[in-house]
Amino acid sequence: ARAKRRDCYKPWTVLVYMAADNDLKPYAFWDLYEMEAGFKSGRNAAGSTARSDLLVQLITPGQPDARRIHVFQSPTPYRDSLQLEELGRRAEADIESPVAKQVPRGNAAADFQSFIEWGIHEYPAEHYMVVVWGHGKGFNGLAFSDSDKSHLSIPDLTQALRQAELNYLNGAIFLKWIITRN
């Protein structure tokens, strides 16, 4: 019999908050394609494995709900010849990994906090990594949404991570900052 996922711990859960409700939609599908795509060796996987779970909350234009996707490696081999234009025409139906949950969209701060807490609760692990994927404007915020004109401020980000730390991790050290700039 299969155990429910929340009843067993894995070493890692990776949570990717993908804010693509803007001009980043084709890039979001490109990154999802790369997370799912099969490698020729068959050994490497960017998606979930026996030791880790990869969860993506995808927010795109024209979608009233956010999709929480449990990403797995596809048997379809990776095509490095794929162009951005082709990925821009992809639809949500082209994502091969299962949608674990659909949730109505709210503002970015509430959506982010809900996603983090859901991921910790439903996919327990020894370690967590949180990735906020989307446009950023330094200390003016990140994860901008064109539809509702919301974004995640730095205080919102800090509050959501601290709240998850207190509510689900018993105050364990969860918050480590890694900031990258392109």
Image (cartoon, rainbow, N blue to C red):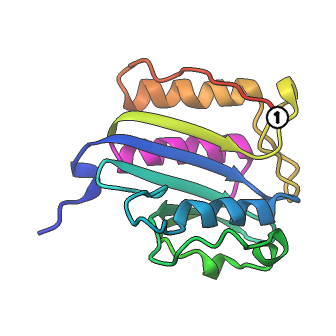
Q: Tell me the amino acid under the disc marked 1.
A: Asn
Magenta stretch contains residue 166: no
Q: Which residue is pictured at 37% across the width and 40% down the height?
A: 12
Q: Left or right: where does residue 8 sit relative to residue 113? A: left
Asked where in the image residue 103 lies, by quadrant, the reply is: bottom right
Identify the element where label 1 is drawn. loop
Q: Is residue 81 left or right of residue 75?
A: right
Q: The C terminus appears in which quarter of the rendering?
A: top right
What residue appears at the point 54 percent right and 23 percent down from the top-left corner?
162
**Visible in this render: residue 104?**
no
Instruction: Please tell me whether residue 88 is drawn above or below residue 25 in the rendered image.
Output: below
Name the foreground residue: 34 vs 164. Answer: 34
Residue carrying label 1: 182
Q: In screen coordinates, is 42 left or right of 111? A: left
Residue 106 within the segment the image draws in magenta: yes
Above/below status of 91 relative to 115: below
User: Is the stretch drawn in magenta largely helix, strand or loop?
Assistant: helix
Q: Position of residue 175 (x, y in %)?
A: 53, 22
What's the magenta region? 104-124
Quadrant that contains the N terminus = bottom left
5 or 181, which is in the foreground? 181
Which residue lies at the image location 49% right of the left edge and 71% below the top edge? 97
In the picture as drawn, the residue positioned furthest to the front comes out as 41
- Please give the name of the residue rendered at 46% of the width and 58% of the height, measured from the top-left corner: 47
**Mark 1 Cα shell of 10 Å, populated few (<14), some (14-19), many (≥20):** few
Residue 36 spot, x, y in % from top left = 53, 66
Could you tell me residue 46's position as x and y percent? 49, 55
Residue 153 drawn at (x, y percent): 77, 31
